[in-house]
Image (cartoon, rainbow, N blue to C red):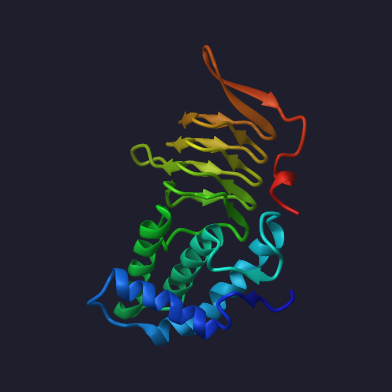
Amino acid sequence: MSPLQLRAGTARQLADYVMHQLDHLFPHAPNGAELLQAHVPGALQRIKPILSACKAFRQDEFDHFNSMQYATFVYLLANELWQHGAEQEQFALCERLFLLNKALAGLDLYYKIAMPEVFFLSHGSGSVLANTEYGNKLVLFHNVTVGRYGESRPTIGQHVILFPGVIVAGNSMIGNGAVISAGLSIINQTVPDDCVVFAGPAGLVFKPKKKSYAAEFFR
């Protein structure tokens, strides 16, 4: 892959930008500027496959003023810090980055959650994502909830699209290529591969896909 072009200028300038936000919104904490600078390159390396795959983004260009890109980057940065450190200062910085995403994007995506290599936050505002298994090339719209029901957590396959207002919870299995229509609640249910899910008079209706919905989002 080609080197990323950054609207912020350099990785150092991007780290300074994030640090200024953290200090403004969540002051009276260990500064952590050097830690942040050390892990920004790793987060940028991880966002490159996302920028390359998503049609909504220019390949090899990261724009911190694009809210979808920035929310993704802030999660990746927090996750990168968490994966590569065990010091109290790093955990404090991870928590502040998590809170930054909640404050700016309304996104509840904890830094310990393992997201796939490629996922697309189509706005993503108001979404809450549980610590579960997510397949690659996942599309998440706004107000999506993926959560536990008791001690059960869902599993989400590859090339899944969750439209606005979807709830997936409990012991649910979302098959590869499934498309969940807006506003549906799927709790302790299995969704077959390659189907579109609608609301019917007697419950969920599964219809075979007639096209690749994922191709609308990914190159």
Expressed as whole percent of the image width and height from the top left, the position of residue 7 reads: 59, 74
Which is nearer the eye, 66 or 162? 66
Expressed as whole percent of the image width and height from the top left, the position of residue 111 reads: 42, 63
Which is nearer the eye, 102 or 43? 102
Quadrant housing the C terminus: bottom right
Which is nearer the eye, 135 or 145? 145
Expressed as whole percent of the image width and height from the top left, the position of residue 90 reads: 36, 77
Expressed as whole percent of the image width and height from the top left, the position of residue 184 reads: 50, 29
- What residue occupies the far bottom of the structure in this picture? 34
Quadrant housing the N terminus: bottom right
- What residue occupies the far left of the structure in this picture? 28
Which is nearer the eye, 38 or 101? 101
Q: Residue at x 66, y 41 (%)?
A: 176
Side of 128 where 88 appears, left or right: left
Q: Residue at x 48, y 72 (%)?
A: 80
Side of 13 where 82 appears, left or right: left
